[in-house]
Amino acid sequence: MPTIREALLVVIGVAAIAFAVVWARNWRRSGSADAGDGGPPTLAQIAIGFVANFFDTLGIGSFATTTAAFKALKLVPDENIPGTMLIGHSLPVVAQAFIFIAVVSVDPTVMLTLIGATVIGGWVGASVVATLPRRPIQIGMGIGLTLAAAFMAGSQLGLFPGGGTALGLSGSKLAVAASVFALFGAVLMIGIGNYAPSMILLSILGMDPRAAFPIMMGAGALVCLAGGFKFMGKERYTRRAALGLTVGGIPAVLIAGLLVKSLPLAVLRWIVVAVVLYAAVMMLRSAFGERTRAIPITA
């Protein structure tokens, strides 16, 4: 009989194959309808995928850096950013999940419970976000990114517990974690990464921070795949940019996960905090700027 860990890897692998097939069909079906979004990704889009997923594999996250790059370079319309990130980062995060689930010890029942909760939350969230107009997405991303920056800065300043040594949770702690992870899955659909808050929550509950990695990566893989199906169905993503994230992201995951042994992560995390705040300000500025233009000026 396969173990829970082995069964989970099979589920993720099968879901990833199905996702790739559906994405290829979606690309062929809709490519002729929008010739400007066809063809191979640009070097800039591939580079964003590489950098974002390199950071992601180290536990820093990818959504904030991707959002900031898309905003700064005006590569993706704001309303398409969540779907583009979810679809483009899905297969790189699958690679992360295989690496960390295979090598990092964690209670398999806890891992399965929290991953399942995240996927349920993400499926519900994607159903809502995939139909939202531009401005609510901008406001939601702006507020979420601001909170993410605050969490990351607080963690850097030692305001949150450093974590314990437990490799699992039980009883009320597991119930609390599952409920919050479902919320993380829902907000992930609007482009707010779950790595920093997931690690903080599990540390507060007494888990070893290293044990959070297979949970975060497994949850991220399946929720991105599930959400990606929703956004593809609604055509709420930019195809070339999403493909660029995948093409650049997979080798970055392999390099960071298998070859990189040490980096000055404290410095990198402060850089990411600054990037997150930049993205948050740009999103909110766009949202309220559009509202100002929409209000007619009367004498």
Image: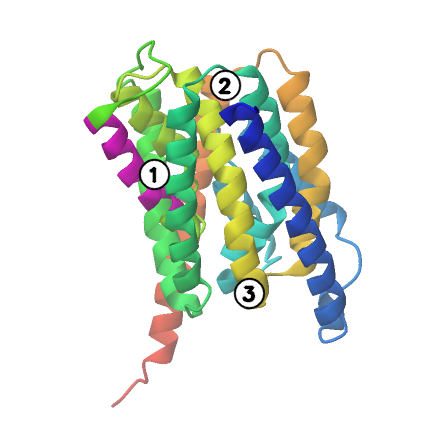
Residue matched to label 2: 265
SS for tag 1? helix
Q: How far separated are the C-alphas under marks 3 and 1?
A: 25 Å
Can the viewer see residue 76 in this picture?
A: yes
The answer to if 178 sits in the magenta stretch is yes
| Horizontal and vertical percent position of residue 220 | 49, 38
Q: Residue at x 35, y 21 (%)?
A: 156
Depth-wise, is mark 1 or mark 2 nearer the camera?
1
Q: Residue at x 36, y 64 (%)?
A: 136
Q: Residue at x 57, y 47 (%)?
A: 69
13 vs 157, left or right, is right
Depth-wise, is mark 3 or mark 1 nearer the camera?
1
Asked where in the image residue 246 lies, by quadrant, the reply is top right
Report the magenta stretch's main SS. helix
Seen from the viewer's position, the closer of residues 265 and 193 is: 193
| Horizontal and vertical percent position of residue 265 | 50, 18
Residue type pointed to by label 2:
Leu
